[in-house]
Image (spheres, coloured by chain):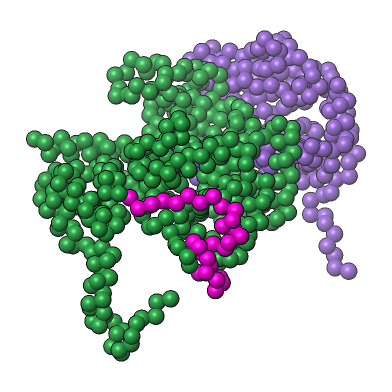
Chain colours: A purple, B green
Amino acid sequence: MASMWVENLRKAQKTCLVQNGRRKIHFTLTDGTELAEEYDLRNDELVVRKWRRKGTIGGIGKWEFEVGEELMIRNLESEGLVENSSNPIFTRKDTKTAFQWRVRNLPYPKETYIVGIDEGQQHISIRTTNKKYYKKFDIPDMNRIQLALEQENLSFAYANNTLIVSYQKPEPILELEKLLQEEFRNMKASKDGDVDCTPS
Amino acid sequence: MAAPTVEKVQEIREVTRIERIGAHSHIRGLGLDDALEARNVSQGMVGQLEARRAAGIILEMIKEGKIAGRAVLIAGHPGTGKTAIAMGMAQALGTDTPFTSIAGSEIFSLEMSKTEALTQAFRKSIGVRIKEETEIIEGEVVEIQIDRPATGTGAKVGKLTLKTTEMETIYDLGQKMIESLTQEKVQAGDIITIDKATGKITKLGRSFTRARDYDAMGAQTRFVQCPEGELQKRKEVVHTVTLHEIDVINSRTQGFLALFSGDTGEIKSEVREQINGKVAEWREEGKAEIVPGVLFIDEVHMLDIECFSFLNRALESDMAPILIMATNRGITRIRGTHYQSPHGIPIDLLDRLLIISTVPYEEKEIKQILKIRCEEEDVEMSDDALTVLTRIGMETSLRYAIQLITTANLVARKRKATEVDVDDIKRVYSLFLDESRSTQFLKEYQQEFMFNEMATETMETS
């Protein structure tokens, strides 16, 4: 199964760029979907992974962040409504050995949170006993190679108004990531600012 | 005693009614029964039985949606309800069938060619019903707070708190969203959905937890459960977009923002062809369904010969909508030529049309229309005054008589009466000239007006 995902990426049109200490790779998959990833050069950690899918009736959609967060300030007028800044902010930020999610702006004590895996073994859910926050999410990396989630790999911690949920990466994922990193390292990356513009 | 209560009633109406009263806002349908027979007075329509019955048959054809590219001409004297019939058809079709209404002179623009404007109007009238996954926010309104700035001018600031059974989120509101929330009269305890992409708000009902509130609520208030899970979810919704909207979304990178600003410019024919192919593909796959709508061109004699020949061609396409045109001209010159033709429309196009004609209203009907308009405009009128107004309507025109309703009401209010009387009608009749009296006046005093110092026979009027 892992090979199918790798195969998909291999077939995709790729552009690689090294900029600001990050290896940025842009994929255009065969169905027209765009995928952009950014890896830290020092430790090969995934910083950003975002998707842009085509709308049903055409047009270009917005970037959807799978990993990392959108830094662009959102415009209230063009969006219509925007979540207030006092709301909890949910982002994914992986480490070498674990998938990790951070929910900032959560002021409630640690006992409030219930983190678990639902029956279908597909989703992780964060609940609060005071019914203020709820989030259900899956791990696309695991879905892509069709692995079920296991309760014992899941853990969470709470400090400084932030809830951190971690899921230990299983062996197949680690292998896949190693394989992909090898591939990326072999890609020819254009360096930022090294465009040859000497007049002849 | 009576005066304050009436005022109060008006106050309440002002709060609930945000829409303004237009010339045809009293029309709610064609007023036909199930057998397509026209009821004499129904849904704001009066008289014109033949024309309405004909329109009803056309309506059936549209609803079946099989026939493409038929055209109908509504011809009749000014003020005989041509636009009213078209409006009635639009109302009867419901909101899901695209109905585009333009005036013949609208297509003459410096920014767009005539045929482009017509093509866009055509494509605005064809809907595509398609399933699409969109991001929606669904929840119960906990609190809605809209603040006006202290200075009185400037942008309003708004906050909306929504909840589900599991969570609660506060949203900041933009200007457009504040407007549509006020328009939908959303309040705490309502269950609403907001389509994130389009900003469309749908009220699902009131929360069960609020069922005990002794609020004033109509019999049609629905109670629904507070939604579960996350506030934001992806949902497959079926909605109707027009071909024009698809064109615009695909025609440039900044896509649908152009739809809001209205600045769509000309759309390349390659884009259109590509969209047509796509839509045909979706149809074959069963993903989408075509909803042919109606294009209504009022004052169609304002189109010129180029437009007419374009229409001839455009109607042949199987993607064409039903075209309804209205004109009040008799045999006249076709714009852009020296030829005379019935209704100012070339014979070859006339040949493709089904023609519905409207006849002048009878006295009884005029009275009925005036009565309906009085209700629509919140004017109370004595029977005598209505009879006088009807006579005025017969002798001058229906439009002039309708104009007198509001003005007479203002006169009546100034003398602190609640009901419009004959004297009020007389007074406004003397204050405002109708068209024939004005012509009479001009004939008598022509000499006193500007540019008549030199004695010429007649003014050049063409």
**Is residue B261 depicted above or below A139 in this figure?**
below
Residue A44 placed where, x, y %?
A: 80, 33
In this view, the residue in front, B203 or B326, is B326
The x and y percentages for residue A61 are: 66, 41
- Residue B234, given in percent of the width and then of the height, sits at 61, 28
Judge from the rendering whether residue A35 lies leftward or rightward of residue B83; answer left or right.
Answer: right
Give the residue displayed 27% in from the left and 70% down from the top.
B439
- Where B209 sits versus B154, above or below? above
- Residue at left offset 48%, top offset 34%: B201
In this rendering, position of residue A122 left or right of residue B457: right
Q: Is residue A114 inside the magenta stretch?
A: no
Q: Can I make out residue B162 in this image?
A: no
Residue B355 included in the magenta stretch of the image: yes
| Image: magenta residue range | B333-361
B234 lies left or right of A42: left
Identity of the residue drawn at 67% across and 34% down: B288
- The residue nearer to you, when weighing B270 against A193, is B270
Locate the N terminus of chain A and report the quarter of the image it occupies: top right
Q: Residue at x 60, y 53 (%)?
A: B352
Whether B100 is drawn above or below A93: the answer is below
